[in-house]
Amino acid sequence: MSGIVEAARGWIGTPYMHQASVKGAGCDCLGLIRGVWRECCGAEPEAVPAYSYDWSEATGEERLWQAALRHLHPVADCDLRSGDVLLFRMHRGAVAKHLGILSQGYPARFIHAYSGHGVVESALAPAWSRRIVARFRFPERF
């Protein structure tokens, strides 16, 4: 999966822009995953509807998790590899709505688009790792 990490690292420095998915111009966390998908897997498998910052918080519907299950392969915590997609729940009881790509296993690091920071590679410190609720792998199409 080094191709996934290499592609994701190519997005580092892209400014944060809600709903965008354009390397160098702007993206959010979902836009980063979409852009890496296009680079490594081909055309996006479905159109992404417009979404607000609070997306499905009012309904509690796990829309991002459901979409990940449609297009990515779930992975057990003990089987994580560089290039895997991490899904985070930012607050207890809230819907999962942040994504990142595991870039390095030890010390653990991940690449994500973060509001106010753009696309960065961060340490997967306890403040982040305790928020992970699911792990996925890109399909092996490349």
Image: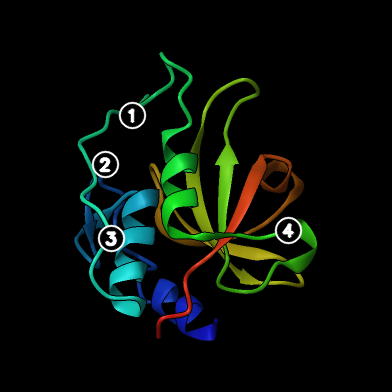
Residue corresponding to mark 2: 18
Q: CA distance from mark 4 to mark 3?
A: 23 Å
x and y percentages locating residue 12 in the rendered image: 39, 68
Q: CA distance from mark 2 to mark 1?
A: 8 Å
Dot 3 alpha-carbon crowd within 10 angstroms: few under 14, some 14 to 19, many 20 or more: few
Q: CA distance from mark 3 to mark 2?
A: 20 Å
Of circles 1 and 4, the one toward us is 4
Residue corresponding to mark 1: 53
Name the residue rendered at 21%, 39% in the picture. Answer: 49
Secondary structure beneath dot 2 equals loop
Query: Which sits in the foreground, 141 or 121?
Result: 141
Of circles 1 and 3, the one toward us is 3
Secondary structure beneath dot 3 equals loop
Seen in the picture, residue 86 relative to 67 is either above or below; the reply is: below
The image quadrant that residue 107 belongs to is: bottom right
Residue corresponding to mark 3: 45
The image quadrant that residue 122 belongs to is: bottom right
Q: Is residue 106 left or right of residue 104?
A: right
Q: CA distance from mark 4 to mark 2?
A: 30 Å
For marks 4 and 3, the one nearer the N-term is 3
* Amino acid residing under circle 2: His
x and y percentages locating residue 63 in the rendered image: 41, 34
For the residues bearing labels 1 and 4, Cβ distance under 8 angstroms: no
Name the residue rendered at 23%, 69% in the picture. Answer: 43
Name the residue rendered at 51%, 56% in the picture. Answer: 100
For the residues bearing labels 2 and 1, Cβ distance under 8 angstroms: yes
